[in-house]
């Protein structure tokens, strides 16, 4: 063997040795690298946190004014997200109508509809979503909490209660005209300068009109007045009650009580103490029908007594000084496993 051949053998031996050492090192590292992948698990706390963020900071989609919470069964497939916020500009302020629809398991199918619209995955998460509100029964959605570990997040929120007008009939005595009106100015109510947390939006939230102390406006406190009907007008034009577009469907469009007894809008019934009318967004979102600076929806109560038995008369403005929404504290809890 020549000298050159000896040098080549030594070079080969050295190179082969280095290669084998490197291979051994790499092989020894691979189990460690794969161990992290093989033992990786779902961070359920992160899933719970993300889910809570979607629920309390997002208004869902579709958004106002034709918001997802007002969709019927025929259009349920158009609902993409189940966010509960009043708007994206008012995180942690929840809307009661959205809450009611979220917990309505007769409308949404548990668990598939929730996995696709809240978790956005086909992964078979188990979950429990609850809403705790002082003075109210706790609302639950999902399965009972497991004995073992699970992801959990608790978010303190506020619930925007619907605007309510409390009207003392005894303060509106002005002759015997026997009509009383309540007016909503949509232009003022929907002013973008108003904080969404306190904005009165009849397109997405119900409005309630409570006329109390009705006996205080009676000519004779021992003889009840008779309410003939309640009518509606937009910008001074009375809405026709016979067309499908404006037909008021009881319970879906409104709820009306006379002295605590359910009634329709043409009751012809005696009134002794109180009138309570709640109009729902399913009907209110259609108005006003015209654009302009003064989009007015007027609600007129007409009494039919001869001789006149009620002295109530006047026009009540349903606005931020008379019917500001209230915010109630609550807690939304999300558990995932």
Image: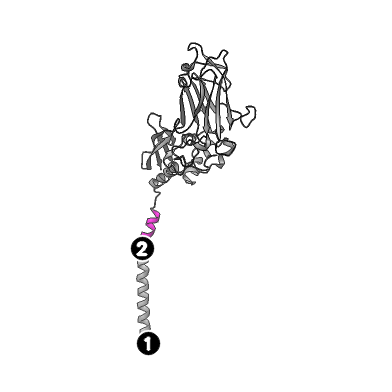
Question: Picture coordinates of residue 164 (x, y %)?
Answer: 46, 29
Q: Residue 61: within the magenta?
A: no
Pointer 1 local density, CA inside 10 Å: few below 14, some 14–19, many at least 20: few
Residue 221 horizontal side relative to residue 228, left or right: left
Q: Which residue occupies 56% across, 12% down?
A: 307
Label number found at residue 244:
none
Q: Is residue 35 magenta?
A: yes
Q: Is residue 109 visible?
A: no
The picture places residue 299, in percent across and down from the top left corner, at 55, 27
Closer to us: 294 or 223: 294
In the rendered structure, find residue 4 and report the number of the disc placed on it: 1
Residues tagged 2 and 1 counted as in contact (Cβ below 8 A): no
Query: In this view, which residue lies farthest toward the top?
Result: 222
Q: Residue furthest bottom?
A: 2
Foreground: 238 or 83?
238
- Of circles 2 and 1, which is in front? 2
Tell me the quarter of the picture where residue 248 sits: top right
Which residue range is magenta in the image?
27-38
SS at badge 1: helix
**Badge number at residue 29:** 2
Q: Position of residue 323 (x, y in %)?
A: 45, 31
Give the position of the C terminus as an image quadrant. top left
The front one of 252 and 186 is 186
Which residue ends up furthest to the right in the rendered image?
A: 243
Q: Quadrant of the N terminus?
A: bottom left
Corner quadrant of residue 303:
top right
**Does residue 157 appear in this view?**
yes
What is the tally of numbered marks visible in this picture? 2
What whole-number distance in Å separates the C-alpha atoms at marks 2 and 1? Answer: 38 Å
Nearer the N terminus, badge 2 or badge 1?
Answer: 1
Q: Is the residue 239 above or below the residue 5 in the image?
A: above
x, y percent for residue 77: 56, 41
């Amino acid at each position: 063997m020549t000298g050159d051949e000896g040098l080549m053998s030594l070079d080969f031996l050295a190179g082969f040795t280095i290669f084998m050492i490197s291979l051994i090192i790499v092989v020894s590292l691979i189990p460690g690298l794969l161990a992290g992948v093989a033992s990786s698990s779902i961070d359920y706390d992160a899933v719970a946190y993300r889910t809570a963020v979607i629920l309390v900071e997002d208004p869902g989609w579709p958004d106002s004014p034709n918001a997802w919470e007002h969709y019927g069964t025929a259009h349920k497939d158009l609902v993409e997200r189940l966010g509960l916020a009043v708007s994206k500009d008012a995180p942690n302020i929840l809307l009661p109508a959205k809450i009611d629809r979220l917990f309505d398991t007769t409308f949404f199918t548990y668990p598939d509809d929730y996995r696709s619209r809240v978790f956005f995955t086909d992964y078979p998460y188990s979950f429990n979503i609850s809403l705790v509100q002082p003075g109210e029964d706790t609302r639950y959605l999902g399965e009972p909490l497991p004995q073992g570990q699970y992801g959990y997040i608790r978010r303190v929120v506020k619930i925007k209660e619907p605007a309510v007008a409390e009207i003392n009939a005894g303060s509106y005595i002005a002759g015997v005209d026997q009509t009383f009106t309540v007016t909503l100015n949509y232009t003022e109510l929907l002013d973008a300068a108003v904080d969404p947390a306190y904005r009165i939006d009849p397109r997405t939230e119900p409005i309630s009109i409570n006329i109390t102390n009705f006996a205080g406006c009676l000519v004779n406190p021992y003889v009840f007045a008779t309410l003939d009907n309640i009518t509606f007008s937009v910008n001074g034009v009375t809405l026709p009650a016979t067309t499908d577009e404006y037909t008021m469907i009881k319970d879906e469009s409104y709820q009306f009580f006379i002295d605590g007894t359910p009634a329709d809008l043409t009751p012809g019934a005696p009134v002794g103490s109180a009138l309570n009318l709640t109009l729902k967004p399913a009907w209110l979102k259609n108005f006003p029908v015209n654009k302009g600076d003064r989009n007015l929806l007027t609600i007129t109560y007409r009494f039919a007594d001869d001789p006149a038995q009620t002295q109530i008369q006047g026009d009540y403005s349903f606005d931020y000084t008379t019917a500001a929404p209230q915010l109630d504290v609550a807690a939304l809890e999300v558990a995932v496993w």
